[in-house]
Amino acid sequence: MYKSVKQTNLETRILKMLEGKPLQAAQMLFNDPELQTMQEYANIVAIRRLGYNDHGPVHMRKATLNAIKMFKLLNEAGIKMNLEKEGVGKAEDSLTAVLLSSLLHDLGMSIARDSHEILSIQLAIPFIDRILNEIYNPEELMTKTAIKATAIEGIFGHMATKHIHSLEAGLVLIGDGSDMEKGRARIPAMLSSEPRVGDIHRTSASAIQRVRIHKGEEKPIAITVEMNASVGFFQVEEVFFPKINNSPVKPYIELYAGVIDRELLRYL
């Protein structure tokens, strides 16, 4: 099973951040050739057929890494996830839901862009069931049910076009949106130099040099977006900010953006 160096490095970073059931789930997903093939094909359709940016193995792992970082910052700040608050799971169960959702959220791009989140749910369910049946005991049925439902909610809501209500799903939404560094738009930019409708998205994404997720000064999470040109503000204001605005995690986030070596603008 071939994997790019970038994908392998991301998997290594993710595995180092996990333990227990989330670690088991990640290992199973990373070693699944069927999932690898499906994610690769999603990227072929997204980039070559539709002209979008990366929606494949690297993107889904980058979104996962971002979501895990934010989960840990909330956990360190004593913020309980919904499964724990509702008495149906522990922190590791919530993290398992976030992991499953993030790693599977764009499978539907292998079929179409329109309603791809709904298609992703259909394609993701067999993987979710397989993993939960492997790492959870039959008597943990309520926890398994809650994890599956929450993972599906995260996939359902990752486009910020549907209302979501759990912190777990909110992390998936923002983790996905945080993957907007220039590398994500590199391949479609190389494949086509002809002007086309929607190029502002590709141009603005190319201006984003770095997205840092770190501990905030006033809130648990700070996200800093660094760009090399002001066109990058389009990506922040028209694509990323609406995702944060629609996320239940919004109250715990500070958002900063700016051109490198200039003053940062604070949004939240």
Image: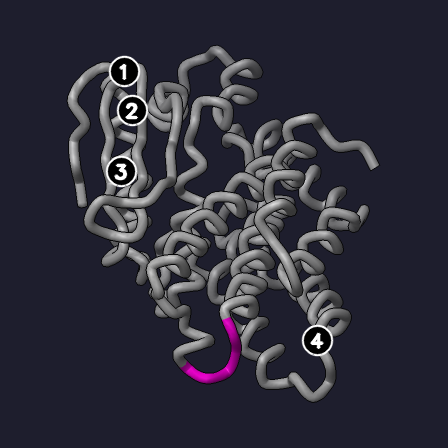
Q: Residue at x 75, y 55 (%)?
A: 28
- Name which residue type carries label 4: Tyr
Q: Are marks 1 and 2 in contact (CB under 8 Å)?
A: yes
Q: Secondary structure at mark 3?
A: helix
Q: Is residue 255 above or below residue 35?
A: above
- In the picture of the structure, the residue carrying the numbered disc 2 is 232
Which residues lie in the magenta part?
86-90
What whole-number distance in Å separates the C-alpha atoms at marks 1 and 2? 6 Å
Q: What quarter of the picture does the N terminus occupy?
A: top right
Indicate whether residue 84 is drawn in magenta: no
Q: Earlier in the sequence, mark 4 or mark 2?
A: 4
Q: Are marks 3 and 1 in contact (CB under 8 Å)?
A: no
Q: Position of residue 61 (x, y in %)?
A: 58, 42
Select label 4 or label 1 by which is in front. Answer: 4
Q: Are marks 3 and 2 in contact (CB under 8 Å)?
A: no
Q: Earlier in the sequence, mark 4 or mark 1?
A: 4
- Residue closer to the observer: 225 or 183: 225
Q: What quarter of the picture does the C terminus occupy?
A: top left
- In the picture of the structure, the residue carrying the numbered disc 4 is 136
Q: Residue at x 58, y 45 (%)?
A: 109
Q: Is residue 118 above or below residue 6?
A: below
- In the picture of the structure, the residue carrying the numbered disc 3 is 238
- In the picture of the structure, the residue carrying the numbered disc 1 is 229
Residue 19 lies left or right of residue 114; in this view the side is: right
Q: Secondary structure at mark 2?
A: helix
Q: Position of residue 23 (x, y in %)?
A: 66, 56
Q: Residues within 10 Å of mark 3 (few under 14, many from 20)?
A: few
Q: Secondary structure at mark 1?
A: loop
Residue 262 lies left or right of residue 154; in this view the side is: left
